[in-house]
Amino acid sequence: MQISSRFTIAVHILICVELYGDEAPATSETLAGSIGAHPVVIRRILGQLRRAGLITVARGREGGAHIARPLREITLADIFRAVESISRGALFSFHEKPNPACPVGRSIHAILDDRLAAIQAAMEREMEKTTLAEVIDAAREQVTEG
């Protein structure tokens, strides 16, 4: 199982908006060039970030995306929740029809549900510890070294 790339694309978008948004409008086309994704994908993720209150998007000369809240108030968990569609709040999903006649099939939820919920909660707790400000600081350091 693998989490989609929407989360890492969203973080990439937010870094670009913060680092380069004052130099040129952060549009879906310019962001797509940095990310290497189609502008439609970028627009979809921009919309999710906007609906979550993490960015604003304006048209015209002063257009493009802008971060809507202080960087220290946005965590990786906020970004993750904004762009990843998690079925019924669960990161892990099950195959649809485990065989109830099989001892493992009828017990698989009892075996895994609590464990997987604990793993997801631990991941989200760790994501809550990292702010966008910390990520931006690391990005600035890497970009100026490169």
Image (spheres, helix red, strand yellow):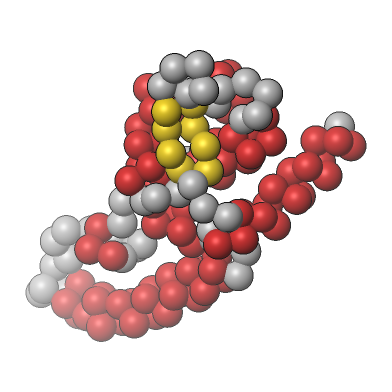
Asked if residue 69 is positioned above or below residue 112 in the image, the reply reads above
Image point 76% across, 50% down: which residue? 138
Q: How many marks?
A: 0
Residue name at image x 35 percent, y 32 percent:
44
Residue 132: x %, y % from top left: 61, 54
Q: Residue at x 20, y 72 (%)?
A: 105
Q: Residue at x 16, y 77 (%)?
A: 106
**Can you give x and y, in whole percent of width and height, for residue 134 in the image?**
70, 57
Picture coordinates of residue 7, whole percent (x, y) = 48, 46
Image quadrant occupied by the C terminus: top right
For the question of whether residue 4 can be seen, the reply is no
Q: Which image quarter: residue 21? A: top right
Identify which residue, 1 or 68, lies in the foreground. 68
**Is residue 87 in view?**
yes
Describe residue 46's horizontal placement relative to residue 140 as left or right: left
The one nearer the camera, 59 or 99, is 59
Query: What is the x, y in percent for residue 32?
Result: 52, 22
- Report the side of 1 relative to 113 (left or right): right
Left or right for 106, reference 38: left
Which residue in the rendered view is the most extreme toward the right? 145
Q: Is residue 116 left or right of residue 70?
A: left
